[in-house]
Image (cartoon, rainbow, N blue to C red):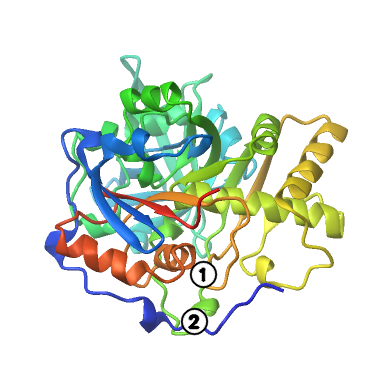
Amino acid sequence: MESRPEIKLSDYQYELPDERIAKFPLKKRDHSKLLHFEEGKINHHRFFNLPELLPDNSLMVFNNTKVIPARLIFKRASGAKIEIFLLQPIAPNQVINEIMIHEGPVTWKAMIGNLKKWKDNESLEGLAIINDQEVKVSATLVDREARYVKISWDKPNTPFASIVEASGEVPLPPYLNRKATSEDKPRYQTVYSQKEGAVAAPTAGLHFTDDILNQLSENGTKKEYLTLHVGAGTFQPIKDENVTDHPMHNEQVVVKKENIKNLLDHDGNIIAVGTTSMRSLESIYWYGVKLLNEKDKLFLIPKLYPYQDHAKKPSVKESLQAILDHMESENIEEITGSTEIFIMPGYHFKVCNGLLTNFHQPGSTLILLVAAFTKNHWKNIYKEALSQDYRFLSYGDSSLLWHHKK
């Protein structure tokens, strides 16, 4: 059984002055600072030094989710604004990748600003300009208590992704405390983003440029891309002093058979680009455990599943092989699953031994993940970053952290 000590929220707080929060991105993505942590030692670099810091036979795993402009503004006939912040799809199904290419009405669970002013059965009207043509967009409140909103539009053969791209606003993190600008649309997006569906960026990837990606290839670093659609729950602060009581958010993971094969074939260092890639990779391991122990084909990892008793704790290779065997027997090329995995001190990492990540909010689930990964050196790391004028949070600087090296 995994060891899971009693964890107090107060042990994972630190003082973050407002002036240390990066409110805007740097002009050049790869000029951010890069803190390098290995075996208790800290060194300072720039992000463009990353390729030379990676050992031979490294594999970097990226999250290729694409942020959608999830903040939609509608107006009532009276002129009152209603803000709809898309959270997760409900109908015609809950698979984000499929919803984004759907060409008919969709229903989403949402956060709704000014909800009291929105009457039941009242249709709100909006306008999107797509290929120089006006498209009328309407929103109807389907379930007030559940916050379900139905969105439809009058131009056939138009995918939902085009509607939000044309009419939505960039969903900047709440702690930036400012409105999105035209600069945010390209900058709050990784250069390798592909799969629409995130409502928050996998921010560790914001530092990469095409040049850096090319240098990694030239240096022999392998690259793998999978998808975890980052949800707004990533910003949800922990409110329980006993952190295991925190309701972890559920996020959708998409993994291809090719991903599994390449992970199986790799015997060197595996570096997760961001906590979302880390959560995806570790969740994939536990999905293999479910297949082997429980013959459970449903890819759903509850938040405390890693800390339960398991009949067998297979190796990473055995777990990945079980997933590959399942995919081949079912003749499927990719699996869409969901994970609530809660990685905290006491967790034993299975897949990743390197992590590239930004600097996170005090008392957050992400701090707990970093604390688990660095064996509780996080306080020294963050103290050093603050003393060296690092920029924090989504548009802030980066760190390369090693759990151990192979």
Q: Are marks 1 and 2 in contact (CB under 8 Å)?
A: yes
Q: Residues within 10 Å of mark 1 (few under 14, many from 20)?
A: many
In primary-sequence order, the first of circles 1 and 2 is 2
- The mark found on residue 344 in the picture is 1
Residue 404 position within the rendered picture, expressed as x and y whole percent measured from the top left = 50, 56
Determine whether 18 is above or below 335 in the image: below
Q: How many marks?
A: 2
Residue 151 position within the rendered picture, expressed as x and y whole percent measured from the top left = 48, 40
Determine whether 315 is above or below 206 in the image: below
Residue pictured at 29% horizontal, 45% vertical: 77
Q: Disc 1 to disc 2, how far (Cα)?
A: 8 Å
Q: Residues within 10 Å of mark 2 (few under 14, many from 20)?
A: some
Name the image quarter holding the N terminus. Answer: bottom right
Residue pictured at 66% horizontal, 64% vertical: 302
What residue is shown with label 2?
Answer: 7
Q: Quadrant of residue 331?
A: top right
Side of 14 relative to 51 (left or right):
left
Residue pictured at 57% horizontal, 35% vertical: 97
Does residue 334 appear in the picture of this structure? yes
